[in-house]
Image (cartoon, rainbow, N blue to C red):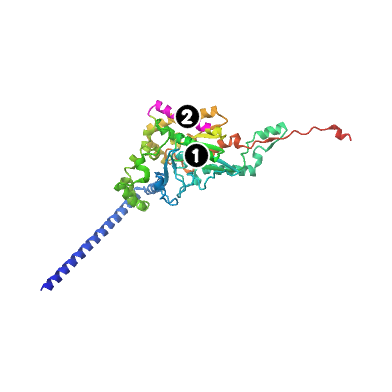
Amino acid sequence: MFKSRTRERRIFTNRQRIRRRSSGLWVLVSIALILLVSELLVRIFIDLSGNKREFSQAQTGSEITDAYNLKFVTDKSSSNQDPKNQSQLKAQPSLAVGYRLLGNQEHKYWQINEQGFRDRDPVPATKPKNEIRIFLLGGSTAFGYGSSSNEATISEQLETRFQQRLQQQKSSPQLYKPDLLSFEPQKKQKQLAKPSKIKPGNYRVINAAVPGYTSGNELAQVALQLLKFKPDLMVVLDGYGDLMLPSTEEATQVPLIKQYLDNQQTDFASYVSQILKPLEQKSYLVKILQDGWLNADKSDKKANFFLNEQTSNLVLHLPPNETELQKRVDRYISHQKQILNLSAAAQIPLVVAIQPEITGRNPSQLTETEGEIATQLGRTYIQQVKASYPAFTQANRQLAQAFPQNIKAVDLYQLTEQYPSPTFIDPIHLQDAANQKVAEQLYYAIASFPKMQVVPAQAAPPKPINPTQYLN
């Protein structure tokens, strides 16, 4: 009888275990079914609402945005990173220039060389004999923030343009001034009316721009980093960052250092976000969860770094009054003068250009996407930028008038009025085709410097005729 009861208890215990296992398995199956049904319902809703294309574009846009967002790290944490497998653009604090990009980074959208320049190859300290080096400085627009590749950036488009010009000089030399001018006045006059040739050589345009940089960072960069590379010419493309940076700051610094350094993830939402990241591009449900909840608090942590600011909040960074605007303009002029002094001492021509901004575009030519950007910016932002931004253009123009041999000013604020094609992906960053338009304007300014041109030699006058040689 005792054995019978023991046997019954064992049977009962086994049945309980089976029930518990079945119950746990059923819970897992139920959760999976709920997630599957939810995913299907979300996809059906997005398809029926007609927003599938916009949703897909948002996913792609999010991927590019993530790739270009700066991640600030320390020397210790950067040593543990695989440079060939980057998900974000990494930078680290620098006493010299505020912060700098880490060297040897690679992503499908960008490559950073060992010096931290946006270039595939390193820049040797000793310049090759036939190389003509042009350095491009600036912030995120000059860097090519949001560009599809290194090849699509302003710097590489500019380099390509010089290569095209050299090829044209070789194939059609009659279009340009000859290397030797005629002695005959009429023929010489016609020759001088033609455009000058640019110097032959291997033109290399080096993208030394860093997202978020303003004129103070660029001044330190020129003084402490770039002059040792012996540039033949420098281009500074900026203006917007100085408009947005408070006059109490001389340059852009690492924002909210405690939140950024080492990318410390201490809260539950950030932890879950990292786990779900690989699924974001495959699941509509995960994408909505990421955007709607897990990333909801990120804007507050980036609020003092306008590069990562929400479009609707950019108006908060504009100068609140005329006095503050003038201080920001004066700071910009002071920095540009110091850059000019350094470049002039080294006999390096300088091009200063005011970067494009969406309020400089004709409202009638705005695309649907650009119209949405303008709406998010708001009327106050648009009015203030239109009233304030030209002050930086005027500052550059005055510098160029005072030092015509050393500096040329280029105003690109309203450049895109001439090009009705889509231009902006946000208030200041450009589509690939617009980068080419900017490169074209910079090319004309650079090519007009006498130092970059071939100076034709003057033909010697014909020898006088000696009548006696005909008498013999």
Residue 113: horizontal and vertical position, in percent? 49, 47
Tell me: 351 left or right of 53.
right
**Range shown magenta:** 320-341
Any part of residue 115 in sight:
yes
Residue 128, compared with residue 278, is above or below; it is: above
Label whose residue precedes the other's in the sequence (1 or 2): 1
Residue 41: horizontal and vertical position, in percent? 30, 52
> Which image quarter holds the N terminus?
bottom left
Q: Foreground residue, 320 or 369? A: 320
At label 2, counting other C-alpha atoms closer than 10 Å, the crowd grade (few under 14, some 14-19, many 20 or more) is some
Mark 1 to mark 2 CA distance (whole Å): 20 Å
Q: Residue furthest top?
A: 323
Badge count: 2
Q: Main secondary structure of the magenta part?
A: helix
Kind of residue at badge 1: Gln
Q: Secondary structure at mark 2?
A: helix
Residue at the disc numbered 1: 225
Any part of residue 61 in sight:
no
